[in-house]
Amino acid sequence: MAAETVRLPTLIHISYSLKVPDSRIYLSPPSVGELEIKQVVAALESGWVAPLGPEVDAFEVDLAEAAGVKYAAALSSGTAAIHLALLGLGVKPGDRVYCPTVTFGATAFAITYAGAQPVFIDAEEETWNVSPGALKKALKKDAASGQLPTAIITVDLFGRTCDYDRIMPIADKYGIPVIEDAAEALGATHGTNKAGSFGKAAIFSFNGNKIITSSGGGMLVSNDETLIEHAKFRATQAREPYPWYEHEHIGFNYRMSNILAALGRAQLSRLEEIIENRRRVHDHYQDHLAGVEGVQVVGDPPWGRSNYWITNIRIDSSIHPNGPNRVREYLETLNIESRNAWKPMHQQAVFADADSYLDGTADKIFDEGLCLPSGIELTNDDVDRIAEFVKVGLLS
Ligand SMILES: *Cc1c(COP(=O)(O)O)cnc(C)c1O
C-alpha cells in the first residue's frame, strides 16, 4: 500500500491549525509533521503492529544515548516508569519515599502504587527544584528517628536539572538511591552530563504535551542492566519463560507499542531543533519581560542548559498581588492558555496526611509562578504579542 493512500487529515490539522491567527494558543502543543507521519506509516506497513517490535528496540537504544546511559525500557507512560523504578529498587508497602512537593501529581501517585508513603520536600528559589538544604535536614531528622526513606525522587522541573552536585553527596551519605524524574527534561544538561544520567535510574515522559511525544509513552533508563531487565519483565505481565503462562510475580501491562515507538523516534531525531525553538520562544519572552518591575523570566540554572520545555515567569506578589491569576484570566479572554505553577503536593487534599519538610518556598512559587505558551510553532510575533498581553494582564 502506498503511503499517499493513507488518510491522516486529523494529524495534519492539529499541527497546522496553530497557525490560524484567531485559533486558541495552547501551552505546549505537539509539533508533528511529515517526518512523523512517514515513520508511523512505515511502522504500520512493516507489519509490526503487535505491541513490541524493532522500533521499540531502536527507540530504547536512541533514547539511552540521548540521556547518556546504557540501558532503557520503553513503557506506556512516564508514570509507569516511576512505578517500575520504585519496585526495582525494592520499595515495599509502608516504606517512605522522598518526593519534591513542587511537581506534577504523577510523581507522587507512583509512590502510592508501590504501597509506599510520599514524604514531601520543599523547593529552592532559583530553579523551583528540590532544595538540597531541605533534603539534608529531612534525612538528618529521619535518620535520628530511624525512619529513613527507601528512595529519593528528584524532579527536573520544566526542563531544568536539579543541583546534583549538592544532592548526590547527601543521598550517598545515607546510602539512599535516587530516581531522577526527568519527564520534562529530555535534552537538558548539568555540566557535561545529561538529564537522565543522575541517580540509580531515571524516567522520561512522551505524553502529548512534553518536549517530544509518542502521543503517550515513557522510558525508564539506567546503567544497571538488571534493573532494566526487571522492568521489562514486570511490564510484560511478569511472564516466566515457560510454554504456558507461569507467574511467580505480579505483572503489569506497561510496554510501549511499536507504532508509538516509531512516532517517538521520529520526534527524538528532531530534539535539537525542538529545543532551539523552545529557547527562541523563551528568549523572546525574556526580551519583552526582563525590564518589567516584579517580573522574572526563569532562565537556565547556573550549572547547565534548560530545554525550555515551558517558559516560566515569577511575578512578585508584593508588587503585583495575585499576579499569576490575573494574567492567566486575562490571557484566557484572548483564547491563550497559560497555567499556574504546579500546586505543591503538600497542599493537595489527596495527600493531606502525608509527612513533609517545608520552609515556605514551594507555597511562594505556587503563588507567584506562571507557565506561558511555549509551543515551537509560535512565531516570534506570536510570542512578542503574548508578552505584551502579559503586561496588560498585570495592569488588569
Ligand atoms: C508528565 C510527567 C510525569 C508523568 O508522565 P506520563 O507519561 O504523563 O505518565 C511524571 N512526572 C512529571 C514531573 C511529569 O511532568
Image (cartoon, rainbow, N blue to C red):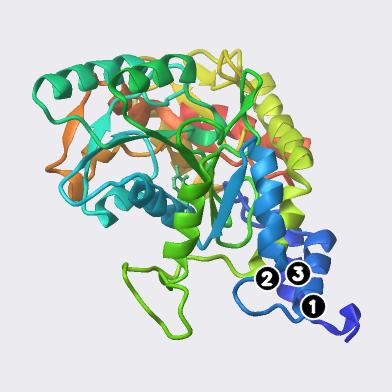
Q: Tag 2's secondary structure?
A: loop
Work out whether 55 lies above or below 247.
above
Closer mark to the observer between disc 3 and disc 2: 2
Q: From this viewpoint, is residue 285 visible?
A: yes
Say which mark, if any, is on residue 53.
Answer: 2
Work out whether 76 lies above or below 151.
below
Is the residue marked 3 within 8 Å of ligand 1, measured from its CB? no
User: Disc 3 or 1, which lies upstream in sequence?
Assistant: 3
Q: Amino acid at mark 1?
A: Ser
Q: Amino acid at mark 3?
A: Val
Per the model, the C-alpha gap separating discs 1 and 2 is 10 Å
Mark 2 Cα-neighbour bin, 10 Å: few <14, some 14–19, many ≥20: some
The residue tagged 1 is 46
Per the model, the C-alpha gap separating discs 3 and 2 is 13 Å
The residue tagged 3 is 40
Q: Are marks 1 and 2 in contact (CB under 8 Å)?
A: yes
Q: Relative to 37, is 113 on the left or the right?
A: left
Q: From this viewpoint, is residue 338 visible?
A: no
Query: Residue placed farthest to the left in the image?
Result: 145
Q: Are marks 3 and 1 in contact (CB under 8 Å)?
A: no
User: Disc 3 or 2, which lies upstream in sequence?
Assistant: 3
Q: Amino acid at mark 2?
A: Gly
Q: Tag 1's secondary structure?
A: loop
Location of residue 200 (image quadrant)? top left
Q: Which residue is found at the position 12% from the left and 43% from the top? A: 353
